[in-house]
Image (cartoon, helix red, strand yellow):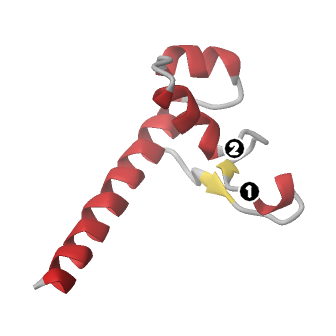
Amino acid sequence: MIGRIINIDPEIMGGTPVFFGTRVPIKNLFDYLESDVTIDTFLADFEGVSKGQVIKVLAMSQQLIETSSNILNENIA
């Protein structure tokens, strides 16, 4: 079981959301993916981040998008 995934601490990277236990910003993952770089390459470049953490962040992002879409669609009607 994976514990905490994201850490937001003003003492770490000025409060930028990072992968828990690292100083790797979550945004880096999305920057890599937007540049068509694979998750495996991301993991090789940021060895402190686990594949489980990446999968969980992506799942959390999907849930946020789905929830936001539902809220936005309700406000359109």
Residue bearing mark 2: 25
* Label tally: 2
Disc nearer the start of the sequence (2/1): 1
Q: Position of residue 63 (x, y in %)?
A: 31, 58
Labelled pair 2, 1 in contact (Cβ < 8 Å): yes
Q: Amino acid at mark 1?
A: Thr
Figure quadrant of the C terminus: bottom left
Tell me if residue 6 comes above or below residue 68 in the rendering. above
Give the vertical position of 20 relative to 66 (above or below). above
Front-most of residues 67 and 73:
73
At x 45% / y 19%, what residue is drawn? Answer: 36
Q: Which numbered marker is on residue 16?
A: 1
For marks 2 and 1, give the CA distance.
Answer: 7 Å
Snapshot quadrant of residue 73: bottom left
Q: Is residue 3 above or below residue 35?
A: below
Task: Determine the secondary structure under disc 2.
Answer: loop
Q: Amino acid at mark 2?
A: Pro
| Secondary element type, mark 1 | loop
Q: Position of residue 2 (x, y in %)?
A: 51, 45
Tag shown at residue 26:
none
Q: Nearer the viewer, residue 54 or 1?
A: 54
Image coordinates of residue 33 in percent, x first then y, are: 48, 28
Taking the spot 25% from the left edge, 75% from the top edge, the residue there is: 72
Residue at 79%, 42% (x, y): give it. Answer: 23
* Residue 44 x %, y %: 64, 14
Callout 2: 10 Å neighbours few (<14), some, many (20+)?
Answer: some
20 relative to 10, above or below:
above
Residue at horizontal 71 percent and vertical 29 percent from the top: 48
- Left or right, 13 with respect to 74, comes to right
